[in-house]
Amino acid sequence: MAEKKVPFTKAQLEEITRKHPTPFHLYDERAIRENARRLMAAFAWAPGFKEYFAVKATPNPALLRLLREEGLGADCSSLAELYLADMAGIRGEAIMFSSNDTPAEDFQKARELGAVINLDDITHIDYLEKHAGLPDMLSFRYNPGPLLKGGNDIIGYPEEAKYGITKEQLLQAYRLAQSKGVRRFGLHTMVISNELNPDSFIATARMMFDLAVEIHQKTGIRVELINLGGGIGIPYRPEQDAVDLEHVGQGIRAAYQETIAANGLHPLTLAMECGRMITGPYGYLVTTVLHKKHIYKNYVGLDSCMANLMRPALYGAYHHITVIGKEAAPLDHVYDVTGSLCENNDKFAIDRALPAIDIGDVLVIHDAGAHGHAMGFNYNGKLRSAELLLKPSGEVELIRRAETLEDYFATLDLRSCGRLAASTANADGE
Ligand SMILES: *Cc1c(COP(=O)(O)O)cnc(C)c1O
């Protein structure tokens, strides 16, 4: 059971909302640090274990910086994400650059920062060489295709996925890169998303360790880095359990001994690139009830919308809701909790049992710390909200201000409107 609590009292939250109007995302620094430490501890046995935090989950340098202090690196997949890692002081091989359909500019920036570049296709060896030059070290993303039985709700079946390369291509890619002077090699995969079964991660590790042995046997190349990808899920529903990281770590340790060590490939560096499980449970969307409406159903309308948290509308995902100050009240009302977009799927919850809600109540939407603010958009003229960091001292730091109308209009070229107005005026004057 995942207990859904909030890391502040009603009085503390009232103090925060006096200074920072809702809606906003609030991240719990202490809990994020403790969580990162739990993951690192589960792999303390693995020489040089690295967690590259998937920047796309929560692309804010203030968070990246505190994760860096806990020994985490950054998994980047775009130019902007590379810049964000750099801003947080994460550089060199503390960055793993795993992108697909990659523009030349992104490769150039990754080379400039000295990131470990993880190629998504065999043709990218030539593309990278031509546009940015080949680095000393290269990694390749493996797609097991139908070799991996069963799929995953978010990622789907590997053979339907656009990512990575086949085993035959992988063997060719290592040989080709080696012939072009690359001397150090990594191996990567990402075949799981939001998975709660710890044994899935152990199975992925076994697949990758076997593959590293096969690569060594067939090409003579010893990969020095195996990145198992991210995908550790979080218990969005109160009845779900968090992944037992210790179990995952120990299971992978046994597989490492049986395969990597037994075949003389020890030591090599193990890595993961989790995003969701690091920040997801410790970010909260704080929002206020603007309206109540009763037609065929009961609606509660918030000052936020799916631009602040898209997962319920996108995946039908469950996000737990706490009504602040009514934590102990009976859940004897049923509401659809909505945002203000002109889209009927702009709902945070459908037919949710909640306490009686009043206009002005503050709601906390849980597990919004990953792919929450990050997925924001401006459709319907909605502005992205602020991000706040709740420090261990209890103080709150504004780590991203809310967007303003000026931000929203900033990319428009209003001179054409001016010309239009002027030409209309001329026409009128004639
Ligand atoms: C999204 C992504 C991750 C992170 O996934 P989580 O589910 O947040 O752990 C890691 N690696 C790649 C390549 C990704 O696309």
Image (cartoon, rainbow, N blue to C red):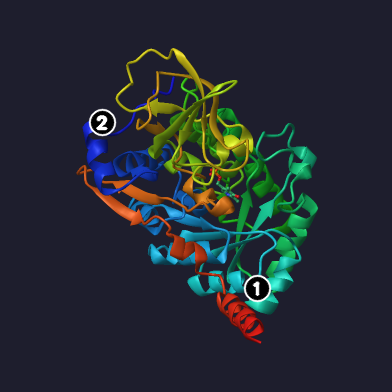
User: What is the distance, in whole Å, between disc 1 and disc 2 at their CAs?
Assistant: 50 Å
Residue at left offset 19%, top offset 44%: 393
- Label 2, secondary structure: give it: helix
Which quadrant would residue 89 be assigned to in this image?
bottom left
Q: How many marks?
A: 2
What amino acid is at disc 1? Ala
Mark 1 lies within 8 Å of ligand 1 (Cβ measured): no
What amino acid is at disc 2? Lys
In the figure, is residue 70 to the left or right of 427? left
**Quadrant of the image for the N terminus?**
top left
Between 27 and 118, the one nearer to me in the picture: 27
Mark 2 surroundings within 10 Å by alpha-carbon count, few (fewer than 14), some (14 through 19), many (20 or more): few
Residue at left offset 76%, top offset 50%: 167
Residue beneath disc 1:
104
Q: Earlier in the sequence, mark 1 or mark 2?
A: 2
Residue beneath disc 2:
10
> Do tag 1 and tag 2 residues touch (Cβ < 8 Å)?
no
Residue at left offset 44%, top offset 42%: 369
Name the spot of residue 298 as percent of width and height, x first. 52, 22
State whether residue 162 is above or below residue 132.
Answer: above
Name the spot of residue 427 as percent of width and height, x first. 66, 83
